[in-house]
Image (cartoon, rainbow, N blue to C red):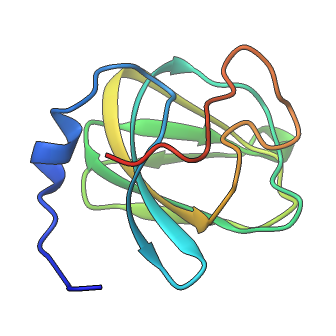
Amino acid sequence: MKPGVINLSEKLSLFSEHWSPKIIAQMNDHHFKLVRLSGEFVWHTHEHTDEVFLVLEGEMTIDLPEGDTAVLGPGEMIVIPKGVEHRPRADTECRVMLVEYAGTVNTGDAEGDLTAPDDVWI
């Protein structure tokens, strides 16, 4: 496979739906995904994998157990360890890159209306 430059802004312009991650690259067994967040997601856990959130634009909050929260702005990231319950949310649209094990479902153990396909490339 030949290496190529990936323009994040260009990729983000290809979709508008919220909470529906799109794969833009793969490194070994991990996917790099772009997602637009707006509103409140569901509490969930990823039992077998850590998850990275890197804010590209906007601001997001991740609710954690026991009332803890993490607020992230542009250029900030957080690693949610496997098995840690969390709930992302954003008051206004936030654009995020996710890095996670290939095949990770966005809603983890809490599948429902916000569950998105985990294999959509753009």
Q: Of residues 19 and 66, which is closer to you in this image? A: 19
Determine whether 13 is above or below 28 in the image.
Answer: above
Task: Write the residue at 31% across / 39% down.
Answer: 95
| Residue at the front extreme of this rendering | 1
Residue 65 to residue 110: above or below: below
x and y percent of residue 86 in the render? 74, 43
Rendering quarter of residue 3: bottom left
Q: Which quadrant would residue 89 be assigned to in this image? A: top right
Q: How many numbered circles does the render carry?
A: 0
Q: Residue at x 86, y 31 (%)?
A: 110
In the picture, residue 92 is in which quadrant?
A: top left
- Residue 15, compared with residue 98, is above or below; it is above
Q: Is residue 6 left or right of residue 40?
A: left
Across and down, in percent, residue 17 comes to 38, 19
Query: In the figure, is residue 53 to the left or right of 68?
Result: left
Q: Dividing the image into 4 quarters, which one contains the N terminus?
A: bottom left
Q: Foreground: 108 or 71? A: 108
Residue 9 vs residue 68, the one in the foreground: 9
- Residue shown at 72% from the left, 14% from the top: 113
Across and down, in percent, residue 84 comes to 83, 56
Give the answer, above or below, for where 71 lies relative to 31.
Answer: above
